[in-house]
Image: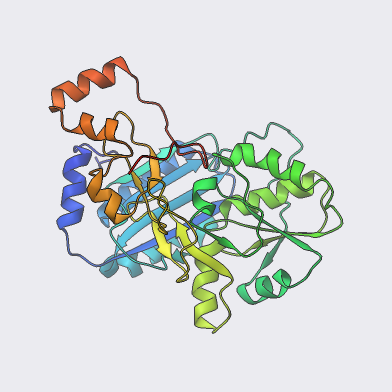
Amino acid sequence: MSKLHNTEDKRVLRQRMLADSTPRTTVSFYKYHQIEDPQGFRDGLFARWNELNVLGRTYIASEGINAQISVPTENFETFVEDLFTIDFLNGIRLNTAVDEGKSFYALKVKLRNKIVADGIEDPNFDPSNTGKYLTADEWNQQLADPNTVVVDMRNHYESEVGHFEGAICPDVDTFREELQVVEDILQNDKDKKVLMYCTGGIRCEKASAYMKHKGFENVYHLEGGIIKYARDAKANNLDIKFKGVNFVFDERLAERISDEVIAACHQCGEPFDHHTNCLNLGCHILFIQCNTCKEKYENCCSEECQNITHLSEEEQKELRKKTPVVRNVYKKGRMPKLTK
């Protein structure tokens, strides 16, 4: 019987990935499509990809598939050929990474209620009634139109390190809360063209359908998101209107799109735009830390966390039992600045 789940310790898998010199191609894709048997589809996909040594994270739901994966470059052609044997994925757009690197260390294919958690309960909402795609060139042209409003459909920690010029960047932690926030922000702009973008296209595609559902008529979204835009703009010598880095949800955490550094270290305020997680597992907060502060605080967000990491592993475990770990995402403008 084919292996259908990971059985090895994630720390072992991560060390193996870091030591492996095999060239890999990082790729993402998504498709909204009704899947009748998500469990069966999920199991078959895991078995096939495990044979090809695919790593990464994929969500399967009755509404479709959302995948961010890493494939050995020597197996990439075989992977694509196999993927295209699935009818609804035949010819699907594949977004290859702008910056390569060691992105994933394990293969995870998980079932979800939705491939993008949106909080939408309205039974009349049609996610297939989306806005119009814009190519990189068309996007640049529309950005120059004064009758447009541009919205970043990503979370605040993504837009903080990189965004399009003039974009509205809501201060939100999740996509589900952003939908309502954006609807409220744009209430007086229903006569304007609404341009939406995200990392690879999946969030802004659903968001464009949501805005049309809410009565907005001129809704557009960037085809393939920031990833495809950056590739196409460079290939066609277009002006790149995106400033900074593109936050990605894997081990790399960012892809460099332009030379501008628009963010700052959360500890000292020096220009910097790369996120990290606090080394104290009882905190693990996501924040921006420059190399100087990384050395000073030993990859921790505070002196308190730094001191905790100096305790024995058993002592740290005991502390975590007393204080349960919660999802600790850095909230823009709310993290206390440390004393140098």
Quadrant in the picture for residue 80: bottom left
* Nearer to the camera, 115 or 38: 115
Q: What x and y, as percent, mark residue 170?
A: 63, 46
Q: Which residue is drawn at 35% across and 40% down?
A: 339
Q: Please tell me whether residue 292 is drawn above or below residue 142 in the rendered image.
A: above
From the viewer's perspective, is 173 left or right of 132?
A: left
* Nearer to the camera, 103 or 93: 103
From the viewer's perspective, is 61 left or right of 70?
A: right
* Nearer to the camera, 78 or 260: 260
Quarter occupied by the N terminus: top left
Q: Is residue 128 visible?
A: no
From the viewer's perspective, is 106 left or right of 247?
A: left
Q: Please tell me whether residue 80 is drawn above or below residue 279 in the rendered image.
A: below
Q: What x and y, as percent, mark residue 196?
A: 66, 57
Quarter occupied by the C terminus: top left
From the viewer's perspective, is 56 left or right of 307?
A: right
